[in-house]
Image (cartoon, rainbow, N blue to C red):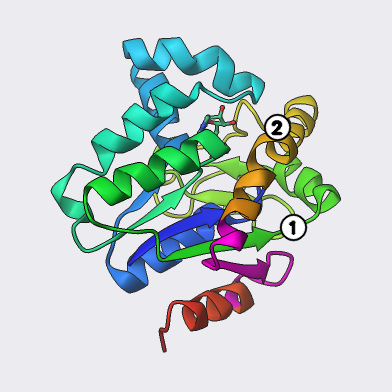
Amino acid sequence: MNLVLMGPPGAGKGTQAKFIAEKAGIPHISTGDMLREEMASGSELGKRVKEIVNSGKLVDDSLMIEIVKERLSKDDVAGGFILDGFPRTLAQSEKLDELMDSIDKKIEYVLYVDVPEEVIVKRLSSRRVCPKCGKSYNMISNPPSDGDKCDDCGTAIVARADDNPETIRNRYRVYEDSTEPVIEYYRNRNVLFTVDGTLPVEKVNDMVLNMIGGE
Ligand code: AMP
């Protein structure tokens, strides 16, 4: 099953992606996570994208397409994959189609997690992540059980550098301008499934399972 997750930053794409990845036994490919790993490792690529990522702007299409092309050439995607955070522009979606054609595959489902802007701003302002294992928390609705320590690995959780109010607004504008047209692109191809991302996580999980034909 080849699946794309769409929706504004903070819609819960990562949470849903992890859920589906586990259920379906396919890899979760988050381009945001891949870029943050490069930044944390201090690689050339990481240095090149750091300023752009931290300001909430988009990394250029050709670089992102290269990164995804390379990732989709790995053996572990043979049984399917979940793309989270890509494609984010029309150019990226067209290139993804070309790439899929060239390997005789297609995107079967595009799941759009719909959440309004005001909810996004509130959610992202209280989001914290574990810098070690990547687990995500919300200090209001889903805090760790021990202060600011990750439940899974005990590391002190932090706010993402791009989760400050100004950058959050920027990211939402970028989403409206560049990424919303991608949703229309998939809607016109009849592969788009919309879920209400303001519902409780478990409810969204159920709807997602239904969509992909799970139990
Ligand atoms: P995310 O974790 O998906 O919110 O991504 C964090 C940041 O990484 C974005 O704000 C962009 O700066 C960059 N990024 C991730 N995916 C893409 C993409 N497909 N195209 C351009 N930039 C991206």
Residue 32 seen in this snapshot: yes
Above or below residue 105? Residue 134 is above
Q: How crowded is mark 1: few (under 14 residues within 10 Å), some or many (20 or more)?
A: some
Is 103 a magenta residue?
no
Above or below residue 113? Residue 7 is above
Q: How crowded is mark 2: few (under 14 residues within 10 Å), some or many (20 or more)?
A: some
Please indicate whether residue 47 sits to the left or right of residue 129 in the image.
left
Q: Which amino acid does label 1 sit on?
A: Val
Q: Who's the residue at 36% across and 23% down the image?
A: 38
Q: Where is residue 9 in the image (x, y as percent from the top left)?
A: 65, 44
Residue 86 seen in this snapshot: no
Is the CB of the residue bearing disc 1 within 8 angstroms of ligand 1?
Answer: no
Q: Who's the residue at 64% across and 41% down the image?
A: 179
Is the CB of the residue bearing disc 2 within 8 angstroms of ligand 1?
Answer: yes
Give the magenta-colored segment's residue range.
186-202
- Residue extending farthest to the bottom is 215
Residue corresponding to mark 2: 174
Quarter of the figure with residue 140: bottom right
For mark 2, give the secondary structure.
Answer: helix
Q: Which amino acid does label 2 sit on?
A: Val
Q: Where is residue 3 in the image (x, y as percent from the top left)?
A: 41, 60
Residue corresponding to mark 1: 115
Please indicate whether residue 41 sits to the left or right of residue 142 in the image.
left
- Residue extending farthest to the right is 118
Distance between the Cα atoms at labels 2 and 1?
Answer: 15 Å
Pick the residue in front: 181 or 74: 181
For mark 1, give the secondary structure.
Answer: loop
Pick the residue in front: 136 or 96: 96
